[in-house]
Amino acid sequence: MGLKQGTRPVRLVKLIGLVAIVALAASGCTADQALHFGWPAAITPQGDRMRTFWMWAGFASLAVGVIVWGLTIWTVSFHRKRKNSDVLPRQFQYSSAIETILIVVPLVIVSVLFYFTVTTQDYVLAKVPNPNLNVNVIAFQWNWEFDYPGYKTPDGQAVKTVGSSQEIPLLVLPTNEVIQYNLLSTDVIHSFFVPAFNFKRDVFPDPDKNNQDSSFQNTIDTKGAFVGRCAELCGTYHSMMNFEVRALPPDLFNQYIQLREQVNSRTGQPYTAADALTQLGQNNPDCGDLCIPHAVTTHPFDTSRTQASASGD
């Protein structure tokens, strides 16, 4: 027999539904954000795998919570001593079945979470023997240097980009290719963090005295411009140690690298990252915002960064 309109249970259900709608609207979350419990979308398959794991872990936690809350409310409501009664509720402290359930169920839950944690971690940290591109990420107080060791400028030096107080460095990368990042600091501990990767890794001065792998790989599946930061307190201008990832389709990236390996006829010097992107935009009308040379998601700060220099300077 259905619940009659206006009864207390019906009003309670409506109230709970209203509270849920107000809470979702007040939080400012989209349906996708709410589904993934606030974990942001990523531009790499590795970041997507972590986001999926976070979502299912959240659902599992909610399911356990609902069961625990339900059992607690049921116990408090129906298994307590009644007023004006000497009859005690039924006792279960010596129930082997309940004790077995309380051991087996948590063990199964922990085992399942452990399995998916390990498989997700293995996927995120996996490496292939021959990545499509190697990039040396060198951190120093308080900026970044990005080297492409497989490519040379006309003077025989590795193609590189070094940030300054006037310009935030651009880390230009191809989409849909395996990229290996080799991390090194020339002074203190920094941290290479690209929020759109859903990933960060500390950058140590001495890789041999590091408690983690000093390199990692990923694949970027979305073109665009994405902010990067140092996520480790590294000194006075830590908050200003920003960079930008510029993800280009492979054909545009190849053209960009070819320009970086040439001399700019206008300046007589090898193309810088900004010069190459500018030239690329001039040669390719479809390049759009990808070929705006300066960082657009962060801004350089007017600070003195002369206390240290990047490698090779």
Image (cartoon, grey):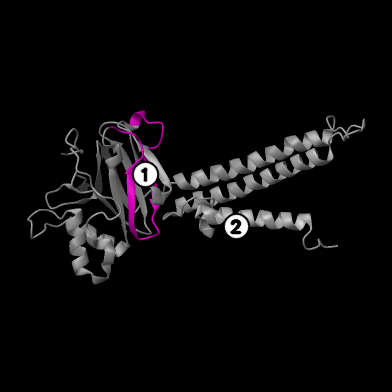
Q: Considering the numbered disc 1 on the image, is that residue within a helix, a strand or a loop?
A: strand
Residue 230 is covered by the magenta coloring = yes
User: On the image, which quarter does residue 276 sit in?
Assistant: bottom left
Q: Is residue 53 left or right of residue 9?
A: left
Quarter of the C terminus within the rendering: top left
The reply to whether residue 59 is in sight is yes
Residue 240 in percent (x, y) is at: 27, 41
In front: 50, or 74?
74
In this picture, is 204 found above or below 25? above
- Look at label 2 and name its amino acid: Ile
The stretch in magenta equals: 208-235
Q: Earlier in the sequence, mark 1 or mark 2?
A: 2
Kindly identify which residue carries mark 2: 21
Quarter of the N terminus within the rendering: bottom right
Residue 166 is covered by the magenta coloring = no
Number of numbered discs: 2
The disc at residue 4 is: none
In front: 100, or 115?
100
In this picture, is 82 found above or below 167? above
Q: Is residue 51 left or right of residue 18?
A: left
- Look at label 1 and name its amino acid: Phe
Kindly identify which residue carries mark 1: 193
